[in-house]
Image (cartoon, helix red, strand yellow):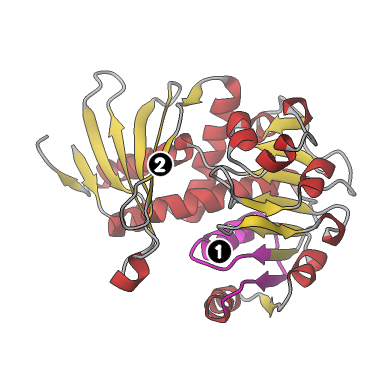
Amino acid sequence: MIVISETLAKELVSVEDAISAVETCFVAMARGDARNYPVVREVVGYADAVYGVKAGADVSAPFLGLKAGGYWPNNLSKGLTNHQSSTLLFDPETGRASALVSANYLTGIRTGAASAIATRWLSRQDASILGIIGTGGQSAYQLRATAAVRDLKRVHAWDPSAENLKRFGEVVESLGLEYRPETDRPAVVGAADILITVTPSQSALVERDWVRPGTHISAMGADTKGKQELDPQLVAASAIFYDEAAQALSIGECQHAHSQGLIGKSDLRAAIGAVIGGMDEGRRSQDEITLFDGTGVALQDLVVADLAVRRAKESGRGETVDF
């Protein structure tokens, strides 16, 4: 078995690498070559933690595995990030465990990659103003990935934490972009060509009337029952795209519009992989509001872990252990 540390994973897989890998994975999902298995997600009842297991396989690659971990909200006081996870890969020929990969960084870039892929395929070609609601740990990944697919000029951001806004602003300015931290959410939403929501919110943060025609929205925060970032009326008024339809309706941003009877499964236009693969259409007009409901799927985690393993083996890096 090969073991890849957090430090090595950062050296092996870039944001651009993750975008390419996840894009390929989304197409494999749309073609039926790759499948995510049912998610396990539970409140631990200890240390206020939420723990989950996501598993799946891509038979066209091939790779097979799972990511386990979750959210430990008290970790920052211990000098650790709140999100902690590890990926275990198995040899698809024999079923033997073949790799253990630290997944904190890789989770960050695969989430940023998914959002950026949706932006590449769904936003207007001239989109250059990014708005971000939520500037916690994931925001820098979102920014860097979006900048890899669109020629950004300016970034507007909102967060309840002034410290988060300041820290995020340093990243924005390091990329040579104009930064405008906002004191209210409508200012961010109204300015944006591309809007990313990436918070743990359980109530709507973005109202329908704030969004300009032609905006693309990547809703990346809702991945559990009860989470919410968008007004259900906004969801219902958008052209909806997704990573996994069942997850979008049950634990994603679409769950609230769905439970209120505003949308059904037939109102979801297409999987993002089907748009990339030319099996379904994406944006239909310059004025359409497009929405990507990014719930996060196992295959995103597995494809970047598999890439890290292949790169490690090619370069003779990583620690090999008898298992």
Left or right, residue 205 beside residue 18: right
Q: Quadrant of the C terminus?
A: top left
Q: Residue 59 location, x and y as percent?
A: 43, 21
Q: Which residue is mark 1?
A: 139
Left or right, residue 284 beside residue 87: right
Give the extent of the magenta segment: 132-161
Is any part of residue 243 visible from this angle? no
Which residue corresponds to the image point at 58% horizontal and 34% vertical from the top-left? 247
Q: Which mark is residue 79?
A: none
The amino acid type of the residue labelled 2 equals Glu
Circle 1: element type: helix
Q: Which residue is mark 2?
A: 42
Figure check: 265 above or below 291: above
Q: Quadrant of the N terminus?
A: top left
Q: Residue 249 location, x and y as percent?
A: 65, 34
Left or right, residue 305 beside residue 215: left
Near-viewer residue (23 or 55): 55
